[in-house]
Amino acid sequence: MEHLDTKSNIQRKIVSGTEVIERKSIRWMMVFYDAVIYFLCWFGAFAVQPSIVEKLPLSTACVYLFAGAVLYFVLRLVLRCYNQIFRYGSVYAFTRQMIADVFATGLYIAVGMLLSKVFHKASAPFTLLLSFAAVYVLLSMGVRLGYYQMYRFAEKNTRISRWTQRVLELFAHVDFHSNTPGAILHLVLEPETRATEPINELQSIADRFAIRGDITSITQINKGYINRTYKVETLSDAGHVHKYTLQRINTNVFPDVDALMDNFKITTNHLFGRLLLPGRGKRGSVQQFRPTKDGRSYLWDDSGCWRMLTYFDNVYSLDIPERPETFYQAGRAFGMFMKEMCDVDIAHIKNVIPNFHNTKSRYLDLEDAIVKDVKGRVKQVQPEIEFVRARADRYGMISDALESGLIPTRICHNDCNLNNILFDNTTHLPVAIIDLDTVMPSSPLYDYGDSMRIGTNTAKDDEKDLSKVSCNLELYERYARGYLEACGGVLTPEELALLPYASLIITVEDGIRFLMDHINGDTYYNIYYPGQNLDRARTQLKLVEDMEQKLPEIKQILRDIYMDLNLNGQID
């Protein structure tokens, strides 16, 4: 597969599953520039040593000229001096060029002396060759140093520097949006946007992790409510693109970062060879973290707490299922996750957010926020508050069953949002489950209900037109079947009996959380416009109302699945 971007003269293709970038027009343009310098230096050497002209006929001179061209350019190509044009602004590039030229000069003089024995008339080519080599190496290196200084000068905000910038953009295709000296590559893919934080700061942070290649692009991924996430692209010496996920951990939500990362490592190490989703290929089905260069799993600096994770390429995520089969596969994926985590000792997993899924506790927190009313918003949300209060007797159904031991405590994902599953671009099958920060002891009823809350909703989670909000029962049936096919055999009869109420409880819980965050001043969830948390709360509460009306149908769907799968669950 090949694609040519005519604006940036970049050709991208997939070779054995690896994305390779070729800059054919720019690479050979630079070779042409060096060839011009080469010929100028040769004639310059004749000018410095005019007596050689009498001893060296034109035909013999052409042989020396051709031999030098072959040696210098072959060695530069072998040492990949033209592979990455953006490297011409780095010390590494200068070093590589010097090594190639030193070897080429030595070989050129040796070959020249050998040729002098063949051409008897050229009895003294050594001085000519040495003069040429000295002038050419110094001039070619000077051009690169001059290019580097031009780039730095062009970044200044003056009239002359802006003209310099235009010259470099025209003749060297420099991308001045990048912070790599001389860079020509800065890709930004939809639906992502360029990073809103200072690019220098992000590049400095990413450079402190053990990643391969030089950073060529950092883009912000505008998904997720909690952490801020970026995609980092690098380019290796061989021209291979590597991609990583850089995240700034929200330490207001996760103050105990050591516990968070311990949970993450235990989960990913356990699941890496065991959670085998159908679309995974050779990529694994969970993210792995990339350590810092000093071996740590995360780093702190003045801008916050950061970690680097693997990045899954050629995948997509969905906020709402594109078709029933998609939701069925999502149910199987989350069911497989829960079943595999049953083998992990629950004592090793820490509660990084106490009472994360405890609907009764969340309701009490809301009442506390209403009393404090720190932003004076309670008057605006009285109908929503009354809706929540009218259902208070339902909020302990799962949490009370956990506390009493009626249902077992298990290790759960705790954020089974559909967009936490990545699907393969080609097969549309699940590749990976991501966002493992909330993996904690809990109940799979919360995971199941959360998936239904997101996936069966016929509208966006911040939909302003509440007439669009409803629970799609066809999608409900497909997810329930996939989930129970994967893990129904490990669920107890008591868990199966509570399953019809799971979506109601978790949906109202999320409505409570969004409403409370709006009242508190939007301190927990990321928002992208004022009032978004209130829109999210209203959407959840409207969905609860629709689920209540459809509860008899939901119960019948589950009865039929229990019968089909021979599960021991009785629903009133």
Image: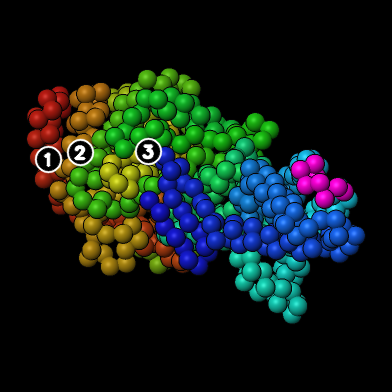
How far apart, in angstroms, are the residues tagged by discs 1 and 3?
28 Å
State the predominant SS element of the stretch in magenta. loop
How far apart, in angstroms, are the residues tagged by discs 3 and 2?
19 Å
Q: Specify the quadrant of the image occupied by residue 569.
A: top left
Along the line of sight, the residue nearer the viewer: 450 or 48: 48
Q: Position of residue 220 (x, y in %)?
A: 52, 56
Q: State if disc 2 and disc 1 touch (CB < 8 Å).
A: yes
Q: Residue at x 11, y 45 (%)?
A: 553
Q: Is residue 87 above or below residue 415?
A: below
Task: Tell me the kind of residue under disc 2.
Answer: Ala
Q: Is residue 467 above or below residue 130?
A: below
Verify whether residue 498 appears in magenta.
no
Task: Tell me the kind of residue under disc 1.
Answer: Ile
Q: State if disc 3 and disc 1 touch (CB < 8 Å).
A: no
Task: Tell me the kind of residue under disc 3.
Answer: Ala
Q: Which residues are magenta?
A: 116-124
What residue sits right under mark 3 in the picture? 432
Q: Which mark identifies residue 480?
A: 2
Q: Position of residue 356 (x, y in %)?
A: 43, 39
Mark 1 nearby-residue class (10 Å; few <14, some 14–19, many ≥20): some
Q: In this orientation, does residue 67 appear?
A: yes
Q: Is residue 80 above or below residue 401?
A: below
Along the line of sight, the residue nearer the viewer: 504 or 394: 504
What residue sits right under mark 1 in the picture? 557
